[in-house]
């Protein structure tokens, strides 16, 4: 994980695509000091003459020995940090001596450097490329500071890096420092990553059972938090049946609410794709009879896209539906049947329209319908095409009938020769 290759694990929402155009503007941005760097130097001490010279002469061949006495300052400067990271990761003839020089000069103040915007990357490189003795000394500096560092934007990255290089006994010791604050850490934008790393590192170990226990009786509340929902997924993924079964039952009891939540829906999608088959089937069974209605919900529609794929692939456990794809056929029947499309002011249904037509015209449900068409067999594709063809023809005659989602449906239909 390095500042150079931009691979540091930044706190993000469950799914966070890169900003459009970021790569295009990257060369220009590198020509300017970052806002973080400007703030850092505005609040900190002025740069030394040596650092100013280093920054002004990037073409000069600098060596670590040239920076002795200033390595701590260089480590907390954007350009200086990049240079030191490169030297720590180097494999040339002088690399080992340079690492030792850097280590000796930095180890005394290594704890403070862990929380520095640029210095934390240097600490990570020392852990990654240092000798066993150097690595141990750096990791020793984390002891008794895990809770504080885990909740720090930069410190949490150092803790995660350390977890990649320590044994189970020490991992459990570090984890124990989070017991008192685990409830807070679950919902912290930085510490949640440390909890996830712990679960991924040693899984169902009894020493981190306190993380799973914290969810007991709290799943409906924690599954809808943007940070703790991720930790819950790692618990369900890495812990034992004994640890996870009570949590899964809480999920099942609150399935509809979670499915319609902006973060809870990720937990349900995970269950469908990664949980035991019986849990996936229970989710699918709960959706029967509500497929069209849920497909129109902003967040539940995400779950239904996964449901369609899973329903097509699995074989129900119990007769009379014990045939591969039987669940898919159940949902297809709902889509091809009439479903309530509108209601009067008293809430009474007044019109009924084929589910596929409603879904085709809906901004969220159309994606679910597209998924169904792509996964359906030829005979089922024809059934869906027959159901929506009249409405599609009508919309084609209207100037406003060419929204993006309708164009996508048209392309699929054209591929079917419809």
Image (tube, rainbow, N blue to C red):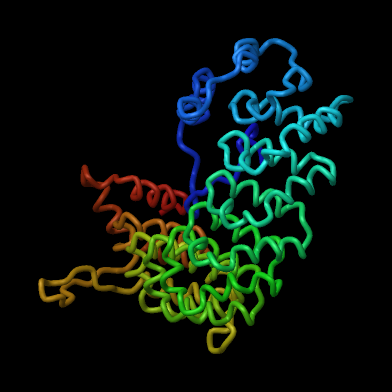
Q: Quadrant of residue 76?
A: top right
Query: In the displayed image of the protein, which residue is found farthest to the right?
Result: 93
Residue 43: image x %, image y %?
46, 29
Q: Quadrant of the N terminus?
A: top right
Residue 164: image x %, image y %?
73, 52
Residue 262, visible in the rendered structure? yes
Camera-side residue of 121 and 18: 121
Query: Residue at left 48%, top 56%?
Result: 188
Q: Quadrant of residue 295?
A: bottom left
Query: Residue at left 65%, top 46%?
Result: 158
Query: Residue at left 57%, top 88%?
Result: 318
Q: Quadrant of residue 404?
A: top left
Residue 342: image x %, image y %?
19, 68
Camera-side residue of 38 and 352: 38
Residue 304, visible in the rendered structure? no
Q: Is residue 135 left or right of residue 36?
A: right
Camera-side residue of 362 and 380: 362
Q: Quadrant of the C terminus?
A: bottom left
Q: Is residue 57 left or right of residue 293?
A: right
Q: Is residue 93 above or below residue 376?
A: above
Query: In the displayed image of the protein, which residue is found farthest to the left?
Result: 345
């Amino acid at each position: 994980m390095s500042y150079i290759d931009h691979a540091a694990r930044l706190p993000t929402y469950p799914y966070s695509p890169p900003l459009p155009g970021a790569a295009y503007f990257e060369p220009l941005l590198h020509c300017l000091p970052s806002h973080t760097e400007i703030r850092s130097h505005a609040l900190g001490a002025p740069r030394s003459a040596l650092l100013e010279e280093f920054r002004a002469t990037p073409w000069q061949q600098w060596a670590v020995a040239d920076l002795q006495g200033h390595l701590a300052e260089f480590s907390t400067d954007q350009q200086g940090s990049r240079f030191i990271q490169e030297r720590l990761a180097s494999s040339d003839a002088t690399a080992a001596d340079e690492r030792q020089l850097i280590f000796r000069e930095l180890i005394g103040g290594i704890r403070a450097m862990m929380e520095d915007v640029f210095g934390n990357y240097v600490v990570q490189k020392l852990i990654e490329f240092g000798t066993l003795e150097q690595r141990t000394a750096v990791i020793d500096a984390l002891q008794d500071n895990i809770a504080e560092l885990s909740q720090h934007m930069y410190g949490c990255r150092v803790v995660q890096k350390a977890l990649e290089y320590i044994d189970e006994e020490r991992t459990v010791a570090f984890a124990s420092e989070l017991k008192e604050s685990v409830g807070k850490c679950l919902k912290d934008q930085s510490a949640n990553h440390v909890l996830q790393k712990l679960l991924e590192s040693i899984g169902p170990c009894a020493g981190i059972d306190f993380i799973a226990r914290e969810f007991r009786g709290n799943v409906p509340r924690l599954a809808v938090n943007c940070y703790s929902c991720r930790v819950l997924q790692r618990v369900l993924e890495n812990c034992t049946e004994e640890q996870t079964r009570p949590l899964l039952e809480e999920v099942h009891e609150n399935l509809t609410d979670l499915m319609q939540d902006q973060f809870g829906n990720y937990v349900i999608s995970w269950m469908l794709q990664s949980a035991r088959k019986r849990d996936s089937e229970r989710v699918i069974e709960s959706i029967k009879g509500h497929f069209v209605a849920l497909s129109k919900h902003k967040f539940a529609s995400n779950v239904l896209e996964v449901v369609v794929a899973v329903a097509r692939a699995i074989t129900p456990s119990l007769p009379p539906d014990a045939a591969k794809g039987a669940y898919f056929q159940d949902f297809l029947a709902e889509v091809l049947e009439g479903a309530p499309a509108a209601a009067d002011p008293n809430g009474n249904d007044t019109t009924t329209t084929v589910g596929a037509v409603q879904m085709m015209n809906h901004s969220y449900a159309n994606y679910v319908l597209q998924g169904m068409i792509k996964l359906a067999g030829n005979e089922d594709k024809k059934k869906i095409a027959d159901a929506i063809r009249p409405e599609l023809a009508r919309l084609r005659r209207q100037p406003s009938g060419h929204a993006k989602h309708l164009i996508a449906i048209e392309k699929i239909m054209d591929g079917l020769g419809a």
